Image (cartoon, coloured by chain):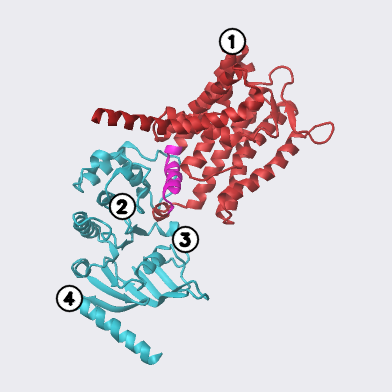
Chain colours: A cyan, B red
Amino acid sequence: MLEISNLRKTFNAGTAHQVKAISGLNLGMAAGEFATIIGSNGAGKSTLLNLIAGAYQPDGGRISIADRDVTTTPEHARAALVGRVFQDPLLGTAGAMTVEQNLALAMRRGKRRGLGWGVDRQMREQFHARLAALGMGLEQRLGTRVSLLSGGQRQALTMLMATLARPELLLLDEHTAALDPAAAPRIADLTAQLVKEQGLTTLMVTHNMAMALTMGNRTLMMHQGEIILDLSGPERAHTSASELVERFASRNQELLSDRMLLG
Amino acid sequence: MAFNPDTYIQAGATGLAYSGLAQGIWLSFRVLNLPDLTVAGSLALGGAISGILITIAGWQPLATLPVALLVGMLAGLATGLLHTKLKINALLASILVMTGLYTITLRVMSIGAAGGIRSELSLYNGTEAQLRDMLAWLPVSVQQRSAIIMIAIAIVMTLLLYWLMSSQLGLAMRATGVNEQMARSVGINTDNMKMLLLAVSNGMVAVSGALVAQNNSYTDANVGNTAIVVGLAAVILGEVVVRSAAVGWALIGALLGSVIYHIAVQIALAQQVQVTDTQLVTALLVILALALPQIGSQFQRLGQRRSAA
């Protein structure tokens, strides 16, 4: 489903602020796989998601989604294959537009946009049903501007928008991190439910070690632009959050000392 | 000076002719959030094209409107290309195109001119030179005929624009203006949407320029000089009158704002204000319109404090 080979990205190349964000990263994901990604700040997690979504162009390497080489495909065209939810609930929706207009925009992801009505009655009924299933009362607020909703409601709406037209790949970038303690678990539950219902191939960045192990079926750890740990199956099942933190710390230490020796 | 209602009807007709300018400016300023000065050039060029087609080529006034629309759209597209493809700052790109359009407008106006270049053009060539002449059979005054024609055209243009902005493409253009990152992530080609919106906006403005020229039986290459301020004044007045951001209401607001503005200027002129003073009157009107919501909320707060005490 997702094939990434020898992916490289450096910011501010050739200047004093040169940052090697992704260095020769390889990753393969089977259809229906749900991988969580952990790693310290600056490990390259968000950069990786931005490269996959096409928001950044890589310096080298290849990315293919559903057997299509998308390495040079622009972001808007790649969106036909990719659904995204951002950390900031304000980023995933158009605040000045209504709930139903946002959903209508998302429904045409990957389709041509013409002069037909943007929102019609049939769509409204469909949105009503999908929103009612969230149990947040949003189905009563189809005509409300999104800027009037809470962060949790906006993020739930973004989740729905990312999956309304079934994406080949779902990218979640710490999408529960900016929410209040009550809303975060609801969005996590909603994520698990939507991914399961549609059998979505998913990549989720998180800082929450427990979430990284309980959600999905594979855990990746990133460090300095590479994947340094890849857990799945029984090995993953027998790893606790505290063990993961330990391995996280020790691997960082090891790599650090290796580098110091080699340097 | 005796009160003559037809003076105000004429002012209203002028306001309606300018409503396309207000709606075009609403599109770029409010929907796309881009300060687009191309409209100053599009307004003058629309007037020049329509004027030349009527006086030199002998076209029906109505038939010149689609040509003005097309030329205005090309002007907007030029600005859009400079901004999105060459990555030139939007304001600068629009100033560059506006500057270039001035020369084109002069060239167009000078077609068939006896002595080289001319910067003004009279559209009066006897009968059938104006849209209102289509209503010559109506037993009403000339001003009233103008107003009727302009109302009809403004309604048609507003409906077409409402349809476009409510369509799938319209939603995509609005999303581009509100949140570009979100727009791209739902698969919208934001560069294309910006170009399309600037094209539509300037097309509207060029049609407006053609209508203004026909309504005045005269056009001038410098007609666009105050276009931005007059158009913005109409948009802001409209927002004061129609307090809704919904697309349909916003378009009606821009239209009403344009009519109110031109009638207000007419009232000012009737109070012995000289034509040369209209710029200051415009500035004061815009400041008043901008200040009204502020003053309103101040009064409200004062009232709350009173009732609390």
Q: Which residues are magenta?
A: B165-180
Give the farthest residue toward the right: B115
Residue matched to label 4: A242
Q: Which numbered dot is residue A158?
A: 2
Q: In the drawing, does residue B71 fall left or right of residue B290? A: right
Residue matched to label 1: B4
Q: Quadrant of the C terminus of chain B?
A: top left
> Are the residues flagged by discs 3 and 1 in contact, CB closer than 8 Å?
no
The answer to whether residue A26 of the structure is visible from this angle is yes
Q: Which secondary structure lies at badge 4?
A: helix
The residues bearing labels 1 and 2 have C-alpha atoms spaced at a distance of 58 Å
Same chain? Circles 3 and 4: yes
Q: Chain of mark 1?
A: B
The residues bearing labels 3 and 2 have C-alpha atoms spaced at a distance of 21 Å
Pointer 3 local density, CA inside 10 Å: few below 14, some 14–19, many at least 20: some
Q: Earlier in the sequence, mark 3 or mark 2?
A: 3
Residue matched to label 3: A74
> Are the residues flagged by discs 4 and 1 in contact, CB closer than 8 Å?
no
Please name whichever residue, A35 or B122, is drawn nearer the observer in this view of the structure: B122
Q: Chain of mark 4?
A: A
Q: Residue at x 18, y 47 (%)?
A: A135
